[in-house]
């Protein structure tokens, strides 16, 4: 069903009347000449300009793209608040297969749309976009991060994203097993692309046993070629059922923790880089009921946004890495708050983030 504007009424319901809404601004962008169709969602600017990446993805429908932008931008508000950044949450999605339609003309058109927001939204890389793309976008928009060092940027933010997830794993091990070391632990990683392959290296350096899978055979092969000791399985369904798995790391797209996967998970900890891992409200309780410790995704994967935020102030890698290392302490704080309040860690993280945003608005 649609309203008089042609918009799906369930999208409007989400925006204006649901608990998942509350977005300040949603912009639909179209440039017929280049084929650009994009959605920019600004969830909150309570802590400062909204900051979040641009996802380029072949969505099944425009409605699905809008829903993803709404969910991702809301998540960025919480992520930036928990990372201690003076930024609100925003996210953009470009609709289409980047392998087929991504052009310089399209990226420049997208940059003009972001620039038209006057700094309310600061963009960066996400699934389907890369440093080279942000260099193009930046030619039309100064509110662009994730650029190359040659163009005044910090380069690939997946390096610190992986480092932050690794710190979240260490904190999870400390909380559950009384020791932050991952030596001898068996870790399963679903998705070894931008972030996942860096995470593999951190784990191997510490002596963990690593099992991987990816929908792209070439991504798996790249890791195996570099690290022959890594074990592979056919798919995520096989990975989550792997016997003796200590930690499961979803590092691909969202919704990995759902009504099908949670009941069969063998891991004792879930800690990964993917955004929006919980498929729907209530999954966090299902994890807790099974005795599975969940490290909230937007907390542990904040290393990348810490890096791109620093780019706005003159990038310093060592300063960023030191800040990303604090994800270890933040994750432990969340586990302690969850235990104190008798709630799942995801709910505890939400409470802390919401308090920071409320304090800023006040």
Image (cartoon, rainbow, N blue to C red):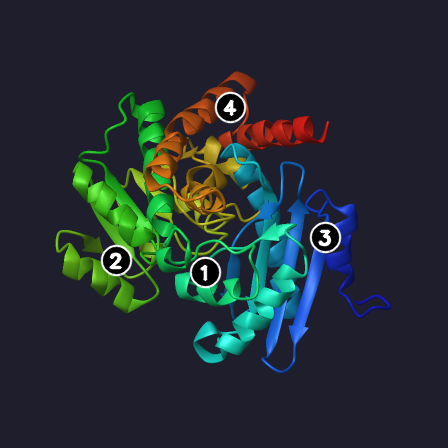
Q: Residue at x 26, y 68 (%)?
A: 218
**Along the line of sight, which residue is nearer the eye, 176 or 252?**
252
On the image, which quarter does residue 182 sit in? top left
Marks 1 and 2, the one that precedes in the sequence: 1
Outermost right residue:
4
Cα–Cα gap, marks 1 and 2:
23 Å
Cα–Cα gap, marks 1 and 4:
31 Å
**Left or right: 214 in relation to 83:** left
- Residue carrying label 4: 338
Q: Residues within 10 Å of mark 2 (few under 14, many from 20)?
A: some
Cα–Cα gap, marks 2 and 3:
42 Å
Residue 160 numbered tag: none
Is residue 64 among the parts visible in the rendering? no
Q: Residues within 10 Å of mark 3 (few under 14, many from 20)?
A: some
- Residue carrying label 2: 233
Q: Residue at x 66, y 47 (%)?
A: 43
- Residue carrying label 3: 25
Marks 2 and 3, the one that precedes in the sequence: 3
User: Are the two marked residues, 2 and 3, in contact with CB atoms closer than 8 angstroms?
Assistant: no
């Amino acid at each position: 069903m649609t309203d008089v504007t042609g918009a799906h009424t369930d999208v409007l319901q989400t925006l204006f009347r649901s608990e998942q809404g509350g977005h300040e601004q949603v912009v639909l962008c179209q440039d017929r000449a280049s084929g650009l169709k994009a959605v920019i969602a600004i969830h909150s600017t309570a802590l400062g300009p909204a900051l979040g990446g641009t996802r380029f993805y072949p969505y099944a429908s425009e409605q699905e793209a809008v829903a993803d932008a709404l969910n991702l931008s809301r998540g960025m508000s919480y992520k930036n608040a928990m990372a201690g950044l003076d930024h609100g949450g925003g996210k953009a999605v470009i609709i289409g297969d980047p392998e087929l339609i991504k052009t310089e003309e399209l990226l420049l058109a997208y940059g003009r749309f972001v620039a038209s927001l006057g700094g309310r939204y600061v963009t960066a890389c996400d699934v389907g976009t890369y440093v080279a793309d942000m260099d193009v976008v930046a030619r039309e928009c100064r509110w662009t991060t994730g650029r190359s060092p040659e163009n005044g940027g910090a380069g690939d933010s997946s390096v610190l994203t992986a480092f932050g997830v690794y710190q979240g794993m260490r904190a999870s091990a400390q909380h559950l097993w009384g020791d932050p070391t991952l030596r001898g632990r068996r870790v399963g990683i679903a998705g070894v692309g931008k972030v996942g392959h860096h995470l593999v290296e951190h784990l191997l350096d510490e002596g963990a046993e690593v099992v991987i899978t990816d929908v792209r055979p070439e991504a798996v092969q790249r890791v195996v070629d570099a690290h022959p000791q890594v074990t592979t399985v056919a798919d995520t369904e096989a990975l989550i059922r792997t016997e003796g798995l200590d930690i499961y790391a979803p590092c691909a797209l969202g919704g990995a923790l759902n009504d099908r996967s949670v009941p069969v998970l063998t891991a004792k900890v879930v800690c990964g880089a993917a955004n929006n891992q919980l498929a729907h409200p209530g999954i966090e309780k299902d994890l807790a009921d099974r005795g599975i410790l969940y490290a909230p995704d937007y907390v542990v994967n904040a290393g990348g946004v810490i890096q791109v935020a620093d780019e706005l102030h003159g990038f310093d890698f060592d300063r960023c890495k030191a800040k990303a290392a604090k994800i270890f302490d933040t994750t432990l704080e969340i586990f302690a708050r969850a235990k104190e309040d008798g709630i799942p860690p995801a709910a505890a993280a939400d409470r802390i983030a919401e308090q920071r945003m409320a304090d800023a608005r006040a």
